[in-house]
Image: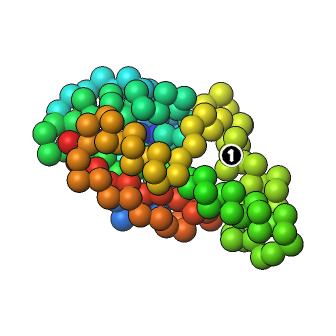
Amino acid sequence: MKLVLGVFDYPPHPYHSKYVDDTWVYSDIDPRNEKIEKIDARDIPYREIEAIYASHLLEHIKDSQGTLKHWYDCLKDGGYVQINVPDIEWALDNMMAINAGDEPLSPFYNNIDRCRDILVGACTTPYDRHLSWFNETKLRYQLKKAGFKSIKITKEYEAHDMGCLIAYAKR
């Protein structure tokens, strides 16, 4: 089984098609479509999972370290996670550029009010608040502490019009 966590809606944004396809099981804590299975990412009921994909989800979980350890335990040997989170350093650099009167780093996050959403979340649902923040060092540390190996993290400006960290790690 390959599992997408926190898909929110179906179909997912086309950006994700480079990582997942319709062979994956789509899940969310609050599904909005019958093609999405109700799963709390903090308590996955399956074991021996081949792969987990979580885009813009981990920042909504207060105990990100405990959740990463749980994901590690749910994967089979050789399984992997692919994680996408906002890069807090990019967000702060963008806010500083805006405050200095410089060109924003994003056409969407072009003022302080919008940048605040990167820090705290959109807060439109009970699950929409940001409770954890990541730079490359923290994400790598938490993945290692959870037991993951072969950790690769890249910085990417992606479909959410912001700088993000894309992590790939194997069990």
Q: Residues within 10 Å of mark 1 (few under 14, many from 20)?
A: some
Of the pair 29 and 93, the residue shown nearer to us: 93
* Amino acid type, callout 1: Leu
Q: Is residue 147 left or right of residue 19?
A: left
Q: Which residue, as the protein is rendered here, is positioned at the far bottom?
A: 103
The image shows residue 79 at horizontal and vertical percentages of: 19, 44
The image quarter containing residue 143 is top left
The image shows residue 9 at horizontal and vertical percentages of: 52, 45
Please tell me which residue is depicted at 77% across the width and 63% down the height of the picture.
96
What kind of element bears circle 1? helix
The image shows residue 10 at horizontal and vertical percentages of: 48, 48
The image shows residue 112 at horizontal and vertical percentages of: 82, 56
Query: Is 104 rendered above or below residue 46?
Result: below
Q: Which residue is mark 1?
A: 119
Q: How many marks?
A: 1
Tell me, what colour scheme is on the image? rainbow
The quadrant of the rendering that contains the C terminus is: top left
Q: Does residue 2 appear in the picture of this structure? A: no
Please tell me which residue is depicted at 35% across the width and 51% down the height of the picture.
82
Please tell me which residue is depicted at 46% across the width and 51% down the height of the picture.
137
Of the pair 137 and 14, the residue shown nearer to us: 137
The image quarter containing residue 36 is top left
Please tell me which residue is depicted at 40% across the width and 39% down the height of the picture.
142
The quadrant of the rendering that contains the N terminus is: top left
Q: Is residue 167 left or right of residue 78?
A: right
Q: Does residue 76 appear in the picture of this structure? A: yes
Q: Which residue, as the protein is rendered here, is positioned at the far left?
A: 77
